[in-house]
Image: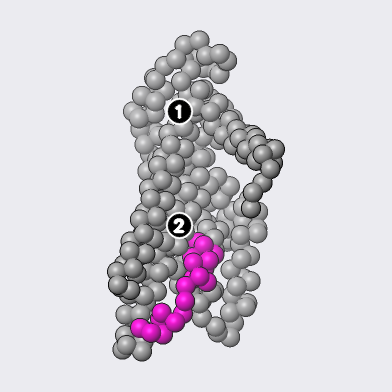
Amino acid sequence: MHHPRSIRIALLCYGVTLIVFLYLPLAAITFASFSKARYLTFPIRRYTFQWYEKAFASPTVADLLTTSLKIAIVVTVISMVVGFFGALAFARYRWRFRGAFQKFILLPIFFPQTVLGLALLMWFNAVGIIPTWKTAIVAHLVWIAPIATLIVAIRAYSFDPALEEAARDMGASTWQVLREVTLPLLWPGIVSAGLFAFLLSWGNFPLSLFTTGADLTLPEWLYAKMVSGYSPLVPAVGTLSVVGSVILIGLGTAFVVWSNRRRAAMSAGAED
């Protein structure tokens, strides 16, 4: 459908304005990380890379990075597995309690994270568990695993069940169907769910605040430094975190595109 020129210009201006509104704070943080002064003044009179040098050399930042990575990686792996099997139960197969399962799995998503984190902290204390980064994994999974399940379920709704039935008719076992048919078809959705899980866990502050105990994650440290003891090291670390997230999203997107093209090429070759 052809739109009038005025509408296209208005939509372009709206899109540019929205992008500027969303990413201007990131630009401000980036500028602050290059300022030699302790606090950001604009225009910046003296630029320096010393804060990035301190970020790479700081043992504190290294420990924070290690803790955040451990939590995010474990949460990602478990969320991908739970999301895969949960999506099959959510969208692929019909069973007696499917409707109840679909409703209950959505509940943690709608709870405020602060309320969920406080509830989990009270539960950990009630059963005598000392909060550490390991309990933060449990807290993150309660909120992130349902999101991963929904992402994979979107993919599960889209593929034809006749493919699995054809594989069974050809003598494939249940495990072979799962490994050779179902898993490859759902793999782009699983990778997307893994990316979401990693980024949501990596940048999570409310759940980590209540459940990490004496351990600190990167978002907790950034918040603490913004409240007291601020230095341009804070925006430097924040900028590096954003850059790492963008690179991860780019790699994941490239993998999904490559996977889709490879599957399309294989399908075209099979038809020939």
Residue at position x 51%, y 81% in the image: 93
Residue 209 placed where, x, y %?
A: 55, 46
Is most of the magenta stretch helix, strand or loop?
A: helix
Q: Give the number of the disc on residue 236.
A: 1
Residue 206 placed where, x, y %?
A: 58, 47
- Secondary structure found at label 2: helix
Q: Residues within 10 Å of mark 1 (few under 14, many from 20)?
A: many
Q: Is residue 152 magenta?
A: yes
Residue 71 or residue 266, whichever sits in front: 266
Residue 270 or residue 184, whichever sits in front: 270
Residue 203 placed where, x, y %?
A: 50, 45
- Please give left or right for residue 146 compared with residue 133 in the image: right
Of the residues shown, which amino acid type is indicated by label 1? Ala
Residue 99 sits above or below residue 204 on the image: below
Measure how far apart labels 1 and 2 are at the Cα level.
Answer: 28 Å
Image colouring: one colour
Residue 246 sits above or below residue 81 on the image: above
Range covered by the magenta-colored residues = 148-167
Looking at the image, is mark 1 or mark 2 nearer the viewer? 2
Residue 116 sits above or below residue 238 on the image: below
Residue at position x 52%, y 71% in the image: 157
Residue at position x 48%, y 17% in the image: 35
Residue 233 placed where, x, y %?
A: 46, 26
Q: Give the number of the disc on residue 192.
A: 2
Q: Is residue 108 magenta?
A: no
